Amino acid sequence: MTSGYDWAGRVGDVWADEWRRTDLSFGDLSAHLNAAIHAAAPRAGLAVDIGCGAGGTSIALAAARPDLSVIGIDLSASLVATARERGAACANLSFRHGDATELGDLAPDLFFSRHGVMFFDDPVAAFARLRAAARPGARLVFSCFDDIDRNPWATEAAAAITNSPPARPGTSPGPFAFADPDHVRAILTVSGWHGDPQAISYTQRAGEGPHAVDEALVFFSRIGPAAARLRELDDAAREEGRQRLRVVLADRLRNDAVDFPAAAWIWSCQAA
Ligand SMILES: C[S@@+](CC[C@H](N)C(=O)[O-])C[C@H]1O[C@@H](n2cnc3c(N)ncnc32)[C@H](O)[C@@H]1O
């Protein structure tokens, strides 16, 4: 299970509301991640999306591998409902509400995740449960953010709110918990997985179109480190913070898109 992030409640509900902007923001990363997932995926068998959110990564794999059974699992009932709606046309795809590390009698050939594995309270126990459920030789492919300092979409936006840089995140559950590959390798090794990370520099798109800055402002006011800071402020300070955030976003506007540099890891692993 997870702590701190109320995925089963408010946070999951906001992500379900914001799935279009979230998918847009991860579009460039997804091109890299989907290529890695599809390269690891068998033609047939079972693949499980850990923390599938609104289902975009599951849908992409199910469409690319019609003979593979794909199951997306998420703690948020709202996100699972959204994913089911989006994936309804895919006969080889289903979604479940619950903890993706509690798999019952499922025996996957592949686990995959876009940024869904950094929130486990006890990552060693969680990855060990996945390993115990997996078929021999199973694969595991996931993305996670690199260091916060290589992610200006997070640092610049959060700094704008209070005119101070965000605290450096540690390894407790959260978006940057898996930023240090040595830390992740240690978790994976002791829980029965081996593999390597690939460093990915990509573009995180905060908004696009004729109202790209407004789009980005809504998105960053609801999801991510700037949103977390805004929630802590009173009404007047929140409005001032939003105005400063707007300036930062406008500064990144080029050709009807608000883009930030971003960095992630894609881990490709196998059951040991
Ligand atoms: C950062 S979001 C990413 C969502 C989705 N993969 C995407 O890329 O849009 C993390 C997701 O992991 C889910 N999650 C976290 N821990 C989980 C667990 N133990 N089992 C199932 N889902 C989990 C959350 O509910 C949330 O939807």
Image (spheres, rainbow, N blue to C red):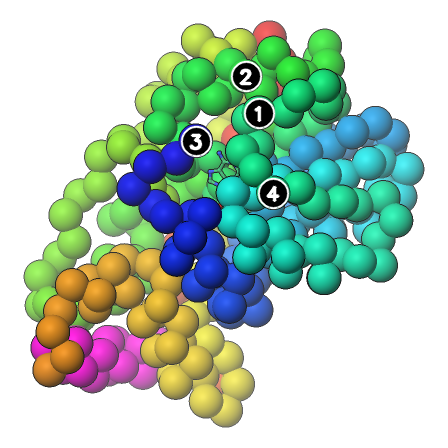
Disc 4 residue: CB within 8 Å of ligand 1: no
Q: Is residue 187 above or below residue 245?
A: above
Q: Amino acid at mark 1?
A: Glu
Sequence-wise, the earlier of marks 3 and 2 is 3
Q: Amino acid at mark 4?
A: His
- Look at the numbered discs 2 and 1 and tell me whether their residues touch, using CB distance below 8 Å: yes
Along the horizontal axis of the image, is 147 left or right of 209? left
- Look at the numbered discs 1 and 4 and tell me whether their residues touch, using CB distance below 8 Å: no
Sequence-wise, the earlier of marks 3 and 1 is 3
- Look at the numbered discs 4 and 3 and tell me whether their residues touch, using CB distance below 8 Å: no
Label 4, label 3: how far apart the Cα atoms are: 13 Å
Q: Residue furthest bottom?
A: 210
| Image point (50%, 20%), residue name | 127
Numbered disc 2: secondary structure = helix
Image spot of residue 133 (x, y percent): 65, 16
| Image point (64%, 24%), residue name | 103
Sequence-wise, the earlier of marks 4 and 3 is 3
Sequence-wise, the earlier of marks 1 and 4 is 4
Q: Which residue is mark 1?
A: 102
From which residue to which does the magenta span run?
A: 237-254
Q: Which mark is residue 129?
A: 2
Q: Is residue 87 above or below residue 267?
A: below
| Image point (47%, 60%), residue name | 13
Image quadrant holding the C terminus, namely top right
Label 2, label 4: how far apart the Cα atoms are: 18 Å
Numbered disc 4: secondary structure = strand
Image spot of residue 194 (x, y percent): 54, 14
Numbered disc 1: secondary structure = loop
Label 3, label 1: how far apart the Cα atoms are: 9 Å
Residue 145, magenta (yes or no): no
Q: Amino acid at mark 3?
A: Met
Label 3, label 2: how far apart the Cα atoms are: 12 Å
